[in-house]
Image (spheres, rainbow, N blue to C red):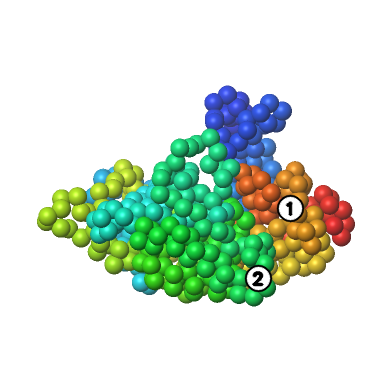
Amino acid sequence: MQFENDLSDVVASDKAHVWHHLMQHKMFETADPKIIVEGKGIRVWDINGKEHLDAVSGGVWTVNVGYGRDTIADAVREQLVKMNYFAGALGSVPAARFSERLISKMPGMTRVYYSNSGSEANEKAFKMVRQISARHHGGKKSKILYRERDYHGTTITTLSAAGQPQRQAHYGPFTPGFVEVPHCLEYRNQYGVTENYGERAADAIEEVILREGPDTIGGLCLETITAGGGVITPPEGYWERVQEICKKYEILLILDEVVCGVGRTGEWFGYQNYGIKPDIVTMAKGVASGYAAISCTVTTEEVFNLFKDDASDPLSYFRDISTFGGCTSGPAAALENMRIIEDEKLLENTKAMGARLEQNLLALMDKHPVIGDVRGKGLFWGAELVTDRETKEPVDEIKAQAVVGHCNAEGVIIGVTNRSLPGFNNTLCLSPALIASKSDIDQITDAIDNALTAVFGSGS
Ligand code: PLP
């Protein structure tokens, strides 16, 4: 593609001044950054004019409705010239309208608290748990459980709840009161059970609760489907037991739907695939598909009522603020994003194309023994690569990266689970926009097929 504007200055400026996220800059001594300049639908063009099929929705499961959506840009522009900002305490027209629409997709939930990123949405949920503990449990029920391999954000407190130790390295000391529970990845069954793995994995949460003392624990925060920690779908029986445990010990269930919310799994929210009734749900990335920065912490009326005014306690309400939280461009974009998902029947497309992606990945698994496991839901999939299906030894990180590199060279951008998990950075990640067509899905899996053959040999 030939771009309209001259971009010849951009790479030098980037290399001189931009501090890239999650990146060792040494590589820029020998290579230029591949800045993405334009996007349309499911495709993007980099600064060299090369076209790519984006199979990871903006790299991190975000651009659910695809690129170049004029109507979202128009809605944001219209809102900004009318009223760009006034502090959230007063409310705004788009926040009221989007909240109404969002709540209509979340039976059982009633209140939306706005912020700007997934980290913040989770941090707000943690603050709610802490304040409920202070006000209703004499400060005793302040601990929050999180799960091995899950991730909830990049601030010091959300990192305190990270089940990915390499993400934490160098950033301590952390916020006290966060306690880890074991992962629930059946493929790496840590209990040796051959039946009812899901219940066993949930029982492990109860064991931690009993060890810590149930009256010290206020919340359990889980990714409904773990994303960067390995695309871990919950095993059968897991959620039913988790729900029972939370009820039994009066622990608030916080579901992190930052990745799997807003259509990604073929339902509006990931938890709706499993019949779970959460107390708090957090969401960010796909809420406005990256057209604006917006995140939400959504609660039940029961949770909201725990912050009801109490004349004897002037500190009783939720005394949190976020200058840009709910800033009008966010909910304006989110409202139009939701309309698109509805009118274009993208949930239905996600289910249909997700089934095709699953089928194609299973066919690749038949052909390439290096694929040890395939997991996912809707348009949110992972293929775990192992050197040996018996031992399940993860493939070398360099080889997993080489598969990604081969796909990129073929014009398909795929991902791999994060490099900060040694031994577990071997799961290829696929999450195309919810508009993906059959031929897009086939192009993605054809590229992976070719890449696996190139890196591991034919019939690898
Ligand atoms: N929760 C999950 C499950 C995530 O994957 C992420 C980011 O990747 C976050 C929270 C943090 O979101 P943000 O980067 O918007 O702060």
Q: Earlier in the sequence, mark 2 or mark 1?
A: 2
Where is residue 41 shown, x and y percent of the image?
58, 55
- Whether residue 144 is visible to the viewer of this picture, yes or no, is yes
Where is residue 240 shown, x and y percent of the image?
49, 74
Q: Residue at x 44, y 61 (%)?
A: 209
Give the residue furthest to the right. 458
Quick one: label 1, few (<14), some, or many (20+) residues within 10 Å? many
Mark 1 belongs to which amino acid?
Pro
Residue placed most toward the observer, 64 or 343: 64
Residue placed most toward the observer, 195 or 426: 195
* Mark seen at residue 193: 2
Mark 2 belongs to which amino acid?
Val
Q: Is residue 18 above or below residue 446?
A: above
From the viewer's perspective, tell me whether residue 392 is left or right of residue 460. left
- Which callout, 2 or 1, points to the residue nearer the camera? 2
Query: Residue under circle 1?
Result: 394
Where is residue 393 shown, x and y percent of the image?
76, 54
Q: Residue at x 39, y 71 (%)?
A: 248
Q: Quadrant for the N terminus, please.
A: top right
* Mark seen at residue 76: none
Q: Which residue is drawn at 75% across and 58% down?
A: 392
Q: Quadrant for the C terminus, please.
A: bottom right
Residue placed most toward the observer, 185 or 223: 185
Q: Residue at x 29, y 67 (%)?
A: 302
Where is residue 201 shown, x and y percent of the image?
56, 66
